[in-house]
Amino acid sequence: MGCMVKLTTHDRAAALAAGLDAFWQWGFHGTSMKDLERATGMHPGSIYAAFGSKRGFYVAALDRYTEDVLADLRRHASEAASPIEGLAGFVEAIALDQDRSARSCMLVKTLLEHGEGDETLRRSAESGIAAIETEIGNNLRRAQQRGETSASFDVEHAARRIQLNIMGLRSFACRPGANESVAIMAHDIANEIRKLKQVPS
């Protein structure tokens, strides 16, 4: 009977980051176990023991990506003067970290690759998108409770629209040489978010 390998939190995070980069570059089907071995420095047995399968590794990496996005959203919200400003700052940060943004359309990439194929991967991507949209909505709801927006403000509609804008921005950021355009679009989207604030009477 094989010995199960339990990675430390640090080692697991490093493996997931390396695996995510490999999957982003070559896609799920195009990434071989050898690719994952080279990317992570792990032996095949350790990969299987830690994640169960290549699919399990992909899902874990996708979940980790979603958790990182949610953490960024919450950090911007906690550091900003208001929930609206936190969302605007989150969008502007996409343009400031171009290297990371070039890898940050992973949820959309997964849906495009597996939208009508692998149900496990599709559901994982859809779950991540829904979680991010919910967190955006939570920020808008806090803004509404603070009186930043009107009482009749449609939080769910606005959250979905912002999510769509962010997904489009991140997908565009994957294009080579798009840095300047991404910065301009991020600024425009951030300003649209700021305009959600109602003017005090």
Image (cartoon, rainbow, N blue to C red):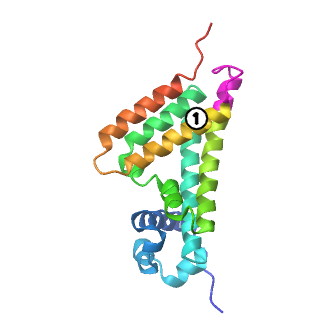
Horizontally, residue 62 falls left or right of residue 177, namely: right
Image position, residue 142 (x, y; %): 68, 29
Quadrant housing residue 30: bottom left
Image position, residue 115 (x, y; %): 56, 61
The residue carrying mark 1 is 77
Quadrant housing residue 159: top right
Q: Is residue 80 visible?
A: no
* Badge 1 amino acid: Ala
Residue 101, placed above or below residue 87: below
Residue 101, placed above or below residue 50: above
Task: Tell me which residue sits at (36%, 40%) in the image.
Answer: 182
Horizontally, residue 29 falls left or right of residue 83, namely: left
Horizontally, residue 30 falls left or right of residue 129, namely: left
Image quarter where the C terminus lies is: top right
Q: In the rendered structure, which segment of residues is drawn in magenta?
A: 139-154
Image quarter where the N terminus lies is: bottom right
Q: Is residue 85 visible?
A: yes
Q: Is residue 89 magenta?
A: no
Query: Which residue is farthest bottom?
Result: 1
Horizontally, residue 149 falls left or right of residue 16, namely: right
Task: Tell me which residue sits at (48%, 64%) in the image.
Answer: 14
Task: Tell me which residue sits at (62%, 67%) in the image.
Answer: 119
Image position, residue 61 (x, y; %): 54, 63
The residue nearer to you, when weighing 75 against 88, is 88
Task: Tell me which residue sits at (47%, 67%) in the image.
Answer: 19
